[in-house]
């Protein structure tokens, strides 16, 4: 499964903490914890987009990882 585009609503739901998922990719777990806190402090549209961009980039760079593939399946179906 390829990494879905940043425009998918699930990305925003994840970084805002609206939805939570049991992630397998450790680097994403760590980054996401920081991003959710940062977005909670400043929920502006620009900040949310920046958070989505960071998380999406991490997943894109590691798209061959089985843990990333599991996360994508879990989040996007």
Image (cartoon, helix red, strand yellow):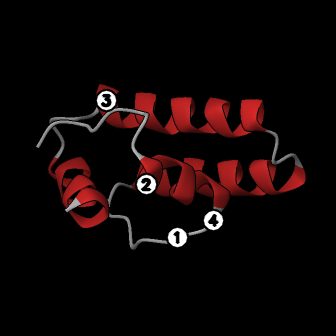
Within 10 angstroms of label 1, few (less than 14), some, or many (20 or more) residues? few
Q: Residue 14 in the image: state x and y as whole percent.
A: 53, 58
**Residue nearer the viewer, 74 or 33:** 74
In the rendered structure, find residue 10 and report the number of the disc placed on it: 2
Frontmost of labels 3 and 1 is 1
In which image quadrant can residue 5 be found?
top left
Q: Give how far apart the Cα atoms at labels 3 and 2 are.
A: 16 Å
Frontmost of labels 3 and 2 is 2
The residue that disc 4 covers is 17
Q: Give how far apart the Cα atoms at labels 2 and 1 are.
A: 8 Å
The residue that disc 3 covers is 60
Q: Give how far apart the Cα atoms at labels 1 and 4 are.
A: 5 Å
The residue that disc 1 covers is 19
Tag 3 secondary structure: helix
Tag 4 secondary structure: loop
- What residue sits 81% from the left and 48% below the top? 43
- What residue sits 31% from the left and 61% below the top? 75
Within 10 angstroms of label 4, few (less than 14), some, or many (20 or more) residues? some
Labels 3 and 4 touching (C-beta < 8 A): no
């Amino acid at each position: 499964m390829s990494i879905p585009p940043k425009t998918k609503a699930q990305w925003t739901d994840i970084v805002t903490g609206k939805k939570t998922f049991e992630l397998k990719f450790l680097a994403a777990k760590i980054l996401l914890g920081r991003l959710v806190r940062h977005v909670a402090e400043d929920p502006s549209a620009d900040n949310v987009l920046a958070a989505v961009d960071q998380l999406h980039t991490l997943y894109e760079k590691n798209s061959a990882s089985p843990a990333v593939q599991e996360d994508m399946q879990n989040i996007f179906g």
